[in-house]
Amino acid sequence: MSKVLKFVLNGMPVKVVAEPQETLLQVLREKLSLTSPKCGCNHGDCGSCTVILNGKAVKSCMIIALTVEGKSVVTVDGLGTDGKLHPVQQAFHEYGAPQCGYCTPGMVMAATAFLNENPNPSYDEVKDALAGNLCRCGGYQKYVDAVMAVAKGEFGPIPKGSDVDV
Amino acid sequence: MREYFYEAPESLDELLGLLQGLNDEEVKLLAGGTDFVPKLSKELDEIPKEQKPPLHIIYMGNTGNNEIKEDSDNVYIGALVTLTEIEESNLIKQHLPVLIQAMEETAGHTVRNVATIGGNIMNASPAADSITPLLVLDAQFVLAGIDGSRTIAAKDFFTGPGSTVIDDKEVLTTIIIKKGKGKAAFKKLGRRKAETLSVVNAAAYIEMDNGICKAARLALGAVAPTAVRCYQTESKLVGKPVKPELIKEICSGVVEEINPIDDIRATAWYRKQVAPVMLERAINQACSEE
Ligand SMILES: Cc1cc2nc3c(=O)[nH]c(=O)nc-3n(C[C@H](O)[C@H](O)[C@H](O)COP(=O)(O)OP(=O)(O)OC[C@H]3O[C@@H](n4cnc5c(N)ncnc54)[C@H](O)[C@@H]3O)c2cc1C
Ligand code: FES
Ligand code: FES
């Protein structure tokens, strides 16, 4: 039995019809044509579907879409400002962290939500923050190094409001 | 395809009323969804062999019970509190640090951000990482029904893998934990460091007096159909001086109290080898820095 779902996606209010059994990942990809969150496993294991929900990184394949009613969802598409990449995106790019890139949007979202709450992390804390994101190309080291570089300010200040709450 | 319905009641009363009205129908309570949604996705991936009855998914996220509170004797954790909220709570840090230890080893951040403590308990997995600490903390679970609520001790709550004494018209609302005098510790052995279920986990609560163990509560997870309180081993410990050699010897006997199986994570044989070691480590930590 479908229902109308209203939430804020990358700062914009959206309205979409969703089925009770549909996940947020399905609604984003199949109904809103936002294919940046990837479906690696669909069972909560790989993290390629990570988005920021009300400020927290979550795996969107495990969120029933209708539960995000009235909440705020941010994907990589909502991060950059005025044609400029977000520092985390810029760092991943310059460190050459992505190889095939499939895990990258999830990595960006997990790292961004983490840095918003922990601007001065240790190396081990960054590893821990990305532990739920698998990279089948095995590029973990560069992802963690890049996040550390962002934390040290190498890529400029992190813009406020990238995790806009409703 | 199976038919699915969705409701998001705005209060506990509304939720309990809804449950009353759904008599011959299948109902699924939804908290964080980290146990339920992967199972649902699996069901949707498979070609159904039989037509299943419609499923009513009832979202609990707007029904309250999402706070951690205290009074002079107890800490009260709402069933809808997320694992991240427990991990970050000053109140828990002050009174029940063992829960933080357990949460930090449960799944990863992105799961803990949505997973709830009530979901971890009600999923009733023998490997659940909150259950062994709650057993040794002697936690009480409050179950609410339309005619009022009842309180059940954690040690009497679990009846098998995925099953508890809860009635299908009841919901878990609160976990009550007495502020104890002793110290507790949790140890987990997984196949990896993060995002992995326990091969074996252990928790210990110890009260000491001048080097003598005054009270002990011990529990092991993933070694039987439910998490196990190790009563015999506890009784061997009480009244004894807590010396590392003695703890080791006492823990070796715990294999008599467990009944592990072979599964995808480990064999029964391996679990019998490591269970005493994990318990010994938990006890040693609970006895340290007194
Ligand atoms: C990648 C991954 C890693 C994981 N790692 C771990 C781990 O290391 N350790 C571990 O213990 N678990 C782990 N889990 C399992 C899961 O995340 C936890 O059990 C979690 O706490 C479940 O909570 P939830 O709110 O998401 O539950 P849900 O899926 O919403 O619910 C679980 C069950 O409990 C019932 N329920 C929920 N709340 C209530 C209530 N208040 N009253 C009555 N019934 C209720 C539901 O109907 C359902 O049957 C992992 C899961 C994933 C996907
Ligand atoms: S697709 Fe969501 S965790 Fe793998
Ligand atoms: S870059 Fe290929 S999966 Fe991570």
Image (cartoon, rainbow, N blue to C red):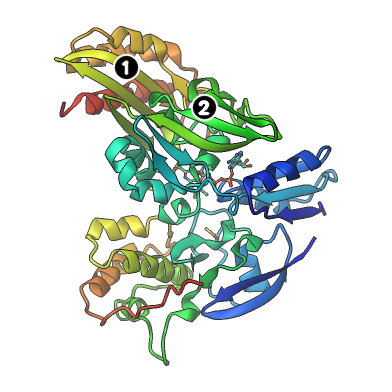
Dot 1 beta carbon under 8 Å from ligand 1:
no
Q: Secondary structure at mark 2?
A: loop
Can the viewer see residue A106 in this picture? Answer: yes
Q: Is residue A78 above or below residue B232?
A: below
Circle 1 is placed at which residue position?
B216
Circle 2 is placed at which residue position?
B262
Q: Amino acid at mark 2?
A: Asp
Q: Secondary structure at mark 1?
A: strand
Q: Amino acid at mark 1?
A: Ala
Q: Quadrant of residue B219?
A: top left
Q: Is residue B179 above or below residue A17?
A: above
Q: Is residue B72 above or below residue A87?
A: above
Classed neighbour count for the residue bearing mark 2: other residues with Cα under 10 Å, few (<14), some (14–19), many (≥20): few
Q: Chain of mark 2?
A: B
Where is residue B195 drawn, in percent x and y?
A: 43, 48
Where is residue B227 drawn, in percent x and y?
A: 48, 25
Which of the two discs, 1 and 2, labels the residue nearer the N terminus?
Answer: 1
